[in-house]
Image (cartoon, rainbow, N blue to C red):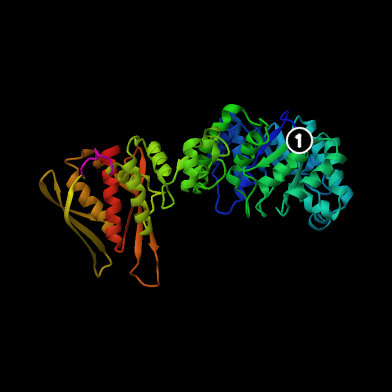
Amino acid sequence: MPTSTDFHVFDTTLRDGAQREGVSYSVADKLAVARLLDEIGVGFIEGGWPGALPKDTEFFARARTELKLRHAQLVAFGSTRKAGVRVEDDPQVRALLDAETPVVCLVAKSDVRHVRDALRTTLEENLAMVGDTVAFLVGHGRRVFVDCEHFFDGYAADPDHGVEVLRTAFAAGAEVGVLCDTNGGMLPMGVGRVVADVRARVEGKLGIHCQDDTGCAVANTLAAVEAGATHVQGTANGYGERAGNADTFSLIGNLVTKMGLPVVPAECMRELQRVSHAIAELANIAPDDHQPFVGASAFAHKAGLHASAIKVSPELYNHLDPAVVGNDMRILVTEMAGRASVELKGRELGVDLDGHADVIGRVVDRVKVLEADGWSFEAADASFELLLRAELPDAPPPLFELESYRTSVEHWGNGDVVSEATVKVHVDGERIISTGEGNGPVNALDNALRQALVSRYPQLADVSLADYKVRILGWKGGTGATTRVLIDTTDGVGEWTTVGVHDNIVEASWHALVDALTYAVRNR
């Protein structure tokens, strides 16, 4: 296995990652992503293909004055000169120089079938294209890396031409030769064998670039490192075309914590989760809760057996301290929860349960009954906290007593739809009647109830619904089914989630709404 000395972490989120379906970065987005990637300590950030894409050309022009990187060097990507064209006369090669980056990454054909059928040229000309372009760029003061496209497929068809491409690139001054699993069809054992074989045949620094079509991109990359590669390429959150690329965050996490290679500055490790989520927001993609190392569920424990062990020692069920990568351990309270789960969750929520064994037992029993009826607390911490605190001896009384509520929806002939709600509640002995309108019965109920309570609880004036989710439980083909409602609520500073369940969707919403407003008063 290689040492950490001169090990490269190369990120291509802005080029290969941008090929993911549905992703379209603006130039401002690309600059923001580059700054974030620099914060996790990667050595190289591939910014795009100048000359081929106007957006990328603009990115490099702006980066010269707007991008101040502390850890990374910016990389321009492009192809070798065209067949039959002098390198000095190739405008695409000239565009690579005009980008004024310290590093250039060239893509070269390394599969004889692609040389003959895609480039429609000879193997000799392909080698000349590689050598000429590398030498030209090196001669202009650039560090050059060469991506050997389709290397593994090409190696299976002809194990010699790809090696000759590498030798030619190194002889011309290339610093790295990257073996690319462009189609993503490899498995770790195959990658390890090929990289070890190439390592024995070639003098020069080898890199690895893996697509994730078999779900093995990270494993394939680590196998290549074990076999001698000292340059790894990945994308933030594994973004990329088709099934994506090796995930940069998983690569760093594994290389540092599992393989003992300090490939990024130690202080950058704790930024992994934050940067992962920030880049997801810029890509307009919801963060993957189950993503290794950085996902919200990466260190979340649900089963009571796990929680019992975690209570004794968190290391028993965590493969590393979550804080190392900026994450945190979470305990999920569900029907699988035992006493340890409730105690740990209470500790997480700031509820002291020492000396309250009876409370813990009642909460465990109540959660099991409620979840059997369709309630789910693992995504609704606010509702669970209220349930837990309600069992304590010093539990505060409810905010109000409900006399009744009524909602109506009127559809007029002109197409207008009007929702209205009236609530009758008792607050500190006073009967209050309030009516509200909204864009639906739940919104109308929210407005009416907050209007009834805000004079006594002024903090509710800043509270609003942020999201509303409905799931039908036990659906049997009709409209009469149990409904679970999750409501996300915000006061502009924080956000919390509550749950309600009932056969009637409005009543389910009412339960979640009451919890949301109660939590706002008790905790904000």
Overall secondary structure of the magenta stretch?
Answer: loop
Horizontal and vertical percent position of residue 83: 82, 49
Q: Residue at x 81, y 49 (%)?
A: 110
Relative horizontal placement of residue 324, taking residue 433 as reference (left or right): right
Residue in the foreground of this view, choosing between 383 and 457? 383
Residue 176 falls within the magenta-colored stretch: no
Residue sitting farthest toward the left: 430
User: Which span of residues is magenta-colored?
Assistant: 391-397
- Residue 7 visible to an observer of this rendering: yes
Horizontal and vertical percent position of residue 267: 57, 27
Relative horizontal placement of residue 76, taking residue 330 as reference (left or right): right
| Three-letter code, disc 1 | Met
Q: How many circles with numbers are drawn on the protein? A: 1
* SS at circle 1: loop
- Give the vertical position of 72 relative to 220 (above or below): above
Report which quarter residue 227 is drawn in: top right
- Residue 70 visible to an observer of this rendering: no
Q: Residues within 10 Å of mark 1 (few under 14, many from 20)?
A: few
Q: Residue at x 65, y 52 (%)?
A: 215
Relative horizontal placement of residue 146, taking residue 275 as reference (left or right): right
Q: Quadrant of the N terminus?
A: top right
Return the residue at label 1: 1
Horizontal and vertical percent position of residue 406: 19, 60
Residue in the foreground of this view, choosing between 281 and 80? 281
Report which quarter residue 370 is drawn in: bottom left
Relative horizontal placement of residue 65, taking residue 462 as reference (left or right): right
